[in-house]
Image (cartoon, rainbow, N blue to C red):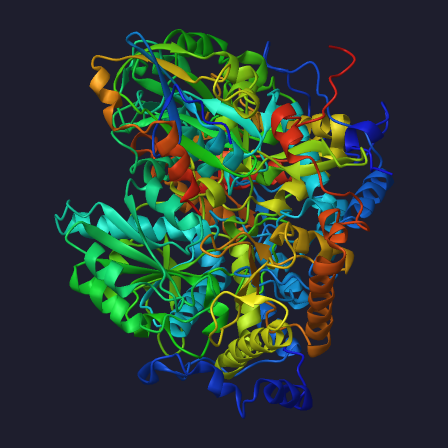
Amino acid sequence: MFIPHTESETGEMLKALGLKSIDELFEDIPDKYRFPKLDLPPALSEMEAFSMVQAISQSNESTQDLICFLGAGAYNHYIPAVVDAVISRGEFFTAYTPYQPEISQGTLQAVFEYQSLIAALTGMDVSNASHYDGATACAEAGVLAFHHFFGKRPRIVISPSLHPHYRETMRTYLQGYADVDIVGDESGVNPLLHPDQLVSKVDESTSLVLVQYPDFFGRIFDLSSLAESVHEKGALLGVAVNPLSLGLLKPPGEFGADIVVGEGQSLGIPLSFGGPYLGIFATRKELVRKLAGRLVGESVDQQGRKGYVLTLTAREQHIRREKSTSNICTNQGLMALASAVYLSSLGKNGMRAVANLCYQKAHYAASQIARVPGFAVLDDVPFFHEFIVHCPDSVEEINLHLLDHGILGGYDLGCDYPTLKNHMLIAVTEMVDKEDIDLLTEILGEAHHG
Amino acid sequence: MQTPSDLKYSKTDEWVKLDGSIAVIGITDYAQEQLSDVVFVEVPFAVGDAATKGKQCATVESVKAAAEVNFPVSGEISEINEALSSTPELLNTDPFGKAWIVKVKIKDAAELGDLMDAAAYIKYCEGRH
Amino acid sequence: MAEPTVFELSSPGRIGVRYPVPDVPESTMPDGLIRNSLPLPELSEQDIIRHYTRLSKLNYSVDGGLYPLGSCTMKYNPRVNEKAARLPGFAGVHPFQPVETVQGCLALMYNLQLTLAEISGFKGITLQPAAGAQGEFVGVAIIRAYHLSRKDEKRTKILIPDSAHGTNPASSAMKGFEIVPIPTDKDGNIDLAALTSACDETSAGLMLTNPNTLGLFETHVLEVIRIVHQAGALVYGDGANLNALLGIVRPGDLGIDIMHFNLHKTFSTPHGGGGPGSGPVGVTENLVDFLPTPVIDIIEDGSEDMAPLYGFRTPSHSIGRVKSFNGHFGMLVRAFTYISMYGGEGLRNISEYAVLNANYLLSRIRNEYKLAYDRVCMHEFVLEGRWDDAPGVIALDIAKRLMDYGFHPPTNYFPLIVHDALMIEPTETENKQTLDAFADALIAIALEAKNEPDLLKSAPHVTPVGRLDEVKAARDLVLCCWIPDRED
């Protein structure tokens, strides 16, 4: 355990306080409820505790044991050893929020660099220090848009091909705001619609149009005409990205996005059964004062030495309290650091290389699966590293069969989209070999006949 | 602390100068001193919008605080000081002159009735903190 | 010498991480969708390691020393937690895997739900919220949903003590509530008379931090809760200060209806330089149906020779999803591991020593500093950072001078109700020698304040940078430093 006091030290301290026992410090607690006995297992030593959790971890199957074709917003990528080496340094991971900049320049500069790397990757002017994840970043985009128009434009248009979790989270967050109306993904709407088809829902009461790029189904669209139409109506365009795909694809800053959000898990963050992940948020400089979350800015001290400091903090909860635009108190500090290390280590060449590997392998997989009788690949629209496969049987059954052969199959789209029953979303990353893809194709062939 | 005698003052540290039927509005020397270095001013209205006495008129941000400026009178906004968006620090250096925030066309001079004169405002400030 | 940025260290053509060439036939790229320039830096692995190693040396951290930050509970972060979270059977698991393949993860989460419920006296637990502030948001959303479910639309106000943390009113406002501040009395408790008159049929709830941000246990907590319940409102407990209550009292037993936990405070998960945290929420029996989705539950009962099947469930009146996937699983593993090393009695030791440490430290400096409220404190206490005979010296100056003595400053300017507040929480993982050294530094600084105030006003002197110009930072607003590609 981590309580260092010896018996004699405890005695000295009690003596200094004029007390006989520690219990005397708790006299303010109502008698009836004081010192409850907690019904918990007895304490374990470190050795026993680790052995126990290790056994628990071993009862799971993981992407270490299985060939992974599962994506849908969280991806199995290779994390270079250098990332963990940096974030395991105690000076980084046991540091507090950098409110005292003189002794936090390590964290502050690292976050400043993260902001810069994200701005460069997305083609936007400025990035904040991160949100919890892609879903909450989308919610914050809605909050920003609401406040940008002073509440006078209560409608938000979202695409049905925005990740289901992001859409749900936006609704949970925005229900508290007066008259906010989120439209675009109603049941009955074709989930595979072209983003330009959202324009009919955009009017003068719309603050934000939010789409995903590549979308939840992996598809890539040219969004420049959507951007024009949205701006014509005076609304903001938000784009939720897969940041790894931006190693290859045109960044939203180049085609008129006002806000770029996204899930940063693919940038050097382990899958870890869903979290902690990283919410990316970048925007144009005109919108910077409406940004929620932390921001690191550059400054100088009295001797003219360059330094970094949290800035525009008057926006935040600890000063504005109920007038702050959001209650965000934290960012995902260590995850932002991990992604900064990932982006700097891969750099220009590495990011292009890994995005290209994903693209190439996914397209090979698509072409192979398309040749399996009974299976059809939806490839009328360009895609990045995920694509939809129309299966002859239920996705659940096919996946059970794949699992028997050590393969983790794709996402069952029927769970979220009733018109996409028997449709599987397959993701392919650089972690998968040609042999793995050939094996997948072979087993799929069996699954249908089996 | 400066307190020009030809102005009227609100309990929430706004000043008003009546120019015919136009009320010029800003914040006082006391207010800018409390805020310290102003870095941002936002007026969430357009010319022609209604001004409602007691409701939010503008937000002023410094490094350590953000404060609401309230309309001390009701009427229609006739002008907004654009200079403050590029040079917010004017609020610290010239709060009664170049750093006026909005001008409001009022219907009724009686609106200013419950505002304090300079002497009353000085006394009011002395009693604070 | 300032450390250059990764962009300044970049050398065109330098390769960092190498990847193999594709092992599949080439596919063509879609027209017009590919980017031309990618202005990311080009560094070798050694460049990266040196750069970040040098940056790390500019940081203060728990590993390096005491953080006496009130309400932050900066306790030591055990290394075994890190080892556990990195196990491949945890780190390598995809959140959408079939539940049959992740029973270990689900069992751990289910177990943690039960454990937190036992510790706090609540019936239902959600592990979804990503941080304390998000836990608060969930709490406020549940309060709103609860009243609406009873068709009570009049309840539009949340009562918040004036000593509360800024996230309390911020979270309430996010759900459209009006804030009613409740004053603190001269003993550091909620003013009961003010509370009674504020509580009526428009009150949705009270947000209570206990012990409060003054480090004091609400002497009349049972009465406070009774008053609020009588008015038909709910009591939300901000669990930031739970480190004082483990095994001492269970908030659920006192009548609190909803409470959030901070795993990164009470349960030792690391602060990471500003996250990730984790903010589970506990609720009473009548609120379990409102919890966010998903909750971990047994979806198929076990038998003598078969373990139960764990899975996800959406509560019948759930407020909805608050983030993607399954909460901060990596932090849940750490907290679970930590708790297993303490057991019930060990958890009580944590709070006993957290409170002993705070009181001992207070006893060492109470002659030199004015105590805001003269009572036995819990795990933290609040001082005034100023003296009548040291005019011009403010809490900020004391904070900056402490850095010259090798300590991170305490929380300052919070709570707002104390002038020049210094909020100090040592936690239970600090030994007596460290407490004495910190007390000695504070005493030395008090003397300097009277005799050599300039030492404080111009502090810090020995840190990598001095006080930074925050006005310049906000006015010039330089928020990034990437360099466009030469190709552009």
Viewer-proximal residue, C10 or A243? C10
The image quadrant where one finds the C terminus of chain C is top right
Q: As displayed, is residue A44 above or below residue B30? A: below
Q: Position of residue C249 (x, y in %)?
A: 39, 77
Q: In which quarter of the image is residue A174?
A: top left
Q: Residue at x 51, y 17 (%)?
A: B84
- Which residue of the protein is positioned furthest toward the bottom in this rendering? A20
Q: Residue at x 72, y 64 (%)?
A: C447
Q: As displayed, is residue C80 above or below residue A407? A: below
Q: Position of residue C293 (x, y in %)?
A: 35, 50
The image quadrant where one finds the N terminus of chain C is top right
Residue C158 in view here: yes
Viewer-proximal residue, C391 or C94? C391
Left of A73 or right of it: where is A28? left
Viewer-proximal residue, A233 or C408? C408
Left of A250 or right of it: where is B15? left
Q: Where is residue A365 in the image (x, y as percent from the top left)?
A: 58, 30
Q: Quadrant of residue C18?
A: top right
Q: As displayed, is residue B106 above or below residue B42? A: above
Q: Quadrant of residue C364?
A: bottom right
